[in-house]
Image (cartoon, rainbow, N blue to C red):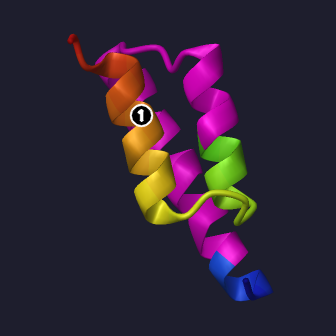
């Protein structure tokens, strides 16, 4: 993954966290880890979405 893509992902995470903060919805520690892995390019978009849905979806 290119540095510019990583920078874009890091900005996206920062914005998402800011929006959650404004709305009064804290980001869990596990979600923070998933966001960080995605921002660094360790997880793909699909993997990140899958992990987040699995964490917050009731079976």
Residue at the disc numbered 1: 52
| Residue 5 x, y percent position in the rendering | 64, 81
Q: Residue at x 22, y 11 (%)?
A: 58
Q: Quadrant of residue 9?
A: bottom right
Residue 5's place in the image compared with 30, above or below, is below
Tag 1's secondary structure? helix
Q: Is residue 49 left or right of residue 6?
A: left
Q: Nearer the viewer, residue 17 or 35?
A: 35
Sort mark 1 into few (<14), some (14-19) or many (20+) by Cα contacts within 10 Å.
some
Q: Residue at x 69, y 32 (%)?
A: 33
Q: Quadrant of residue 54?
A: top left
Q: Is residue 22 left or right of residue 26?
A: left
Predominant secondary structure, magenta span:
helix
Residue 17 lies in the magenta-colored region = yes
Residue 47's place in the image compared with 6, above or below, is above
| Residue 52 x, y percent position in the rendering | 42, 34
* Boundaries of the magenta span: 6-34
């Amino acid at each position: 993954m290119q540095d510019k893509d990583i920078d874009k992902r890091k900005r996206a995470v920062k914005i998402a966290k800011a929006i959650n903060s404004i709305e009064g919805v804290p980001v869990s520690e596990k979600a923070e880890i998933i966001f960080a892995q995605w921002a660094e390019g360790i997880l793909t978009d699909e993997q990140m979405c899958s992990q987040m849905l699995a964490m917050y979806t009731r079976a």
